[in-house]
Image: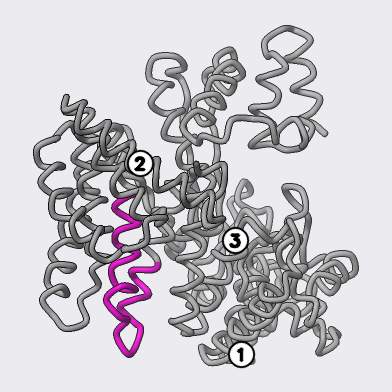
Amino acid sequence: SNEVEAVNTLLSHKTLTKTDRMMIGSILPSVSDSQLISLLPKNPKTMTKAIVDSLIKVLKPLQPCVLVFEGDGEIDPSSWSVVVELMLRAVKQCPKLMFVMSSRNAPATPSAMTTTLSDDIIHVTLAPFEKHETEIYLKVLLGVRERGVGIDERMLDAVHHRANGCPQFIEYIVHWALDKNLIEYVENHNSMSFKSLDAHPDDEIIPRELSSIVLAAFNDLSPILWDALKIASCIGYSFDADVYNALTDLGFIPKIKKLANRYDAFEKCDGNRYKWKHQAVYEAVKSLLIKSQRQKIHSMIAEVFERNVKGGMLGDAGKGDVHRLLARHCSLAQKWDSAFNQYMEAGKRAEETYNFTEATSMYQEALSIQEKMHPTPLPRSRLLPTVKLGNCLRELARYEESEAVLTRCLIEAERTMSEIDGDEQMYVHVLASLATLYQNESKYDDAKKLYEKALPIARTIQESRSSLWLAGQIAGYAEILRKSGDLASAEGLHREALDIRSLAAEEGSGTELEL
């Protein structure tokens, strides 16, 4: 591929090293061996800095240049982290770079970008064509702009009204009209016009439903393949075939391959991803579905995924994004309980791989879903995503945001403690999380006060002397005492935590690794 050739050339000129090749391979898998990429550091901050080091080596000699990041939905957190780091470093190391980021929806810009680069960011909303812009585009499409030929006013009105200012829809109308031989040059007016405008009302020249023009190539499609098109329109503009291959009950990916090969509806991009070949076709298929139909399709997709998750049928390909995707489909199907559980699982998976940016996003989604759940979740379910969100923000060094989230959570936890069903274990969890944040900020006195509340409760509710959870609380307090200079007390508590873990390992309730 072009990427492989380019990297090989840069290696031969010693612009890049073999390590650089692996780093670039982590974002362009085609340029490096997947087994080598798997050996790269797992820490997201370390990886991001190393990737940007390698990218700057490539981009520096190419200045001035433009980097274009295209997306059909939310820009994923790992891409944001690379963009933010690259923009921050480019100021001094590679100043003649321009970043263009396109997204179907307004992207949620990370706080690190808005606070440090706010003066350098310009948001541009792409709006539909105005009438005069539609006229210019019609002249370009018909090849008459340079010849001083105009566009008949009634033809312009008909096209602009029906296309709603969408350039690709204008293209489809023009191609459809040319195929039907419906456009002519009117010499006495020196303009292009629809034939027989006088014989038909304006709105009869172009079919009432624009989708019938855009989808004309699919008129002979079988109902089964039409169903696949509709499912794909609900999934999105692009999708990973490895993940959606799990929809075996629907035979989805084999139908997509058929639609790609025989009807040119899709094309492959980025490994085993498919995207719609024409955005106008995607929009037109989406427009055929009313809300209840889309909801039914998302529900059907969610049910198949859930069966495969429970049956362990997803394999390695489905482990990464499946919970996030399943959560999205459950949400769009208005299955709020399932969506909440899947966002929580997606957040947990992201935390396990130290991708705290992704985990933050997942817990924020879970909290958003929580507001739609009925009946209201129990206190533990209410508080858990908030605590986890606060912890992830702490890991990202977003301390002010973390403190605001965890303080609100503590107020809620204290309120529930005054009720009959107060959850003491969750209360300890919240106290410990806020204490750990204060420890990171070197506010040791505040942290000690919180643990002095938490630890007696933890000892009361966990009578077992082999409780790893209790050992964790004791060790957490010990670390704060150590960092604040009380070494004797810290050692005593650390030894107590070690004894508990040793006993847990002997009883088989804990592992040697935990010990």
Please state which of the two labelled residues, at mark 2 or mark 1, is closer to the viewer.
2
Please tell me how crowded label 2 is: few (under 14), some (14-19), or many (20+) other residues with Cα within 10 Å: some
Please tell me how crowded label 1 is: few (under 14), some (14-19), or many (20+) other residues with Cα within 10 Å: few
Q: Earlier in the sequence, mark 3 or mark 2?
A: 3
Which residue is the site of mark 1? 204
Q: Earlier in the sequence, mark 2 or mark 1?
A: 1
Q: Amino acid at mark 3?
A: Leu
Which residue is the site of mark 3? 138
Where residue 190 sits, quadrant-wise, is bottom right
Give the CA separation, mark 2 to mark 1.
61 Å
Where residue 172 sits, quadrant-wise, is bottom right
Residue 286 in view: yes
Q: Position of residue 301 (x, y in %)?
A: 65, 80
**Magenta segment range?**
366-391
Q: Amino acid at mark 1?
A: Glu
Residues at marks 2 and 1 touching, judged by CB atoms closer than 8 Å: no
Which residue is at 21% across, 26% downward?
Answer: 487
Q: Position of residue 501 (x, y in %)?
A: 44, 46
Q: Position of residue 425 (x, y in %)?
A: 28, 65
Relative to the observer, which residue lies in front, 218 or 14? 14
Q: Is residue 390 magenta?
A: yes
Q: Amino acid at mark 2?
A: Glu
Q: Is residue 330 magenta?
A: no
Which residue is the site of mark 2? 395
